[in-house]
Image: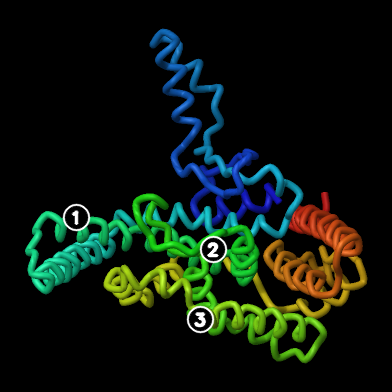
Amino acid sequence: MVPTLNEILESELGADHGLLFRPQWRFNYSVITTDMAQILAEDLYDIFPAHDRDELSQIFPPKRVHVFSFPVLEKTNVLLGSIVGHEIGHFFHNRWKDTGQFKQYMEHAERQLSTHYKSEERKKKTRNIFEAYEKAQNGVLVVKGMYREILPDIIGYFLFGPAILFALYYITDFEATIDTPRKENRFYPPTKYRIRLIFERLYKRDSDVKGVRDEGSQCSEALKNFEGELESYLETKNDLSALSQVHVERQLFEDTLDDLLEYAKASVSGHYFSHEFIGAMYDKLARSVPINEISGVPMTMCSILFVGWLRFYEINEEHSQENYVKEYQILTRLLLKSVFSSNVHRRFLQRGPS
């Protein structure tokens, strides 16, 4: 997947961006958005004499190098590579933080939260100004946490399509609790809330998804089954209950959500997922055939991941124990082969006959 992911990163952020992947023992995906090459260069400059700087600078490639970390236990799980769409989204979030729009939103949030928590203190008749100030400041961090994690989710959806929604839903199996954003959890909004927003504000309005759903194929039925499972999962609103303690912060964020969607849509230049050929891809994958191309046309990585996720959730429903392990291993190998082969095929077509 790395060559394709690198192409997406360069296409969206510039040819001077490159990535490295680093396994880690924690079950977590993350990215270092700063330029690691520059950090290493500065360390070397501190060690060697100043007159060697020009020579040392030749060691490093003319690119910004960013490190993406992934759980070592998931090194062959091509499906969870969809999460990288969220990690790339952090670069867009960093850019957006420098805009006047972000500053305007945060100034408004600070005023509203200060007024709200002062009013709460008056109702309790304690008039504890310091507590009101502390709650307002924590509230600002809650809003910032929502922007920090949910804007990258939105960007990830525009990059990877519904695959990122499938991946986030899969990750919830490993989350023990749904917590209120606070200092102890670095003000992270609940993953379930993030899924709810993507599902309701992006997925349900996605014309490509509608195109798959309306096909009347085996793939359409698999998609509808997944949607039913997701809607059942979202019926229990424990994520919204966890956010009830920060309901003002949540409202301040959601008031700006439409603007965030417009920003994300305008910021992502490529279109990496399409519903075209999805039905044919699904039929091939169900027969354990690689889905790197249809009728001589190489399929995109995001389309391959979308079909792979649908097949994965179907395997979850149909198989158990040894059969599940066998079917999952076959699926993983087919998807790895498909992503790699489609990339080779596409590069060959771009280069043309020699």
Residue 90 percent across, percent down from the top left = 46, 54
In this rendered view, identify the residue nearer to me: 89 or 58: 89
Q: With 131 as the anchor, is 19 left or right in this view?
A: right
In the foreground, 165 or 271: 165
Q: Give the Cα distance between marks 2 and 3.
A: 15 Å
Determine the residue positioned at 46% across, 24% down.
41
Q: Nearer the viewer, mark 2 or mark 3?
A: 3
x%, y% of residue 156?
54, 63
Residue furthest front as drawn: 125
Residue beneath label 2, please?
A: 156
Q: Is residue 295 above or below residue 151?
A: below
- Above or below, 104 relative to 26: below
Q: Nearer the viewer, mark 3 or mark 1?
A: 1
Is residue 41 visible in this depiction of the protein?
yes
The residue identified by callout 3 is 200
Residue 268 seen: no
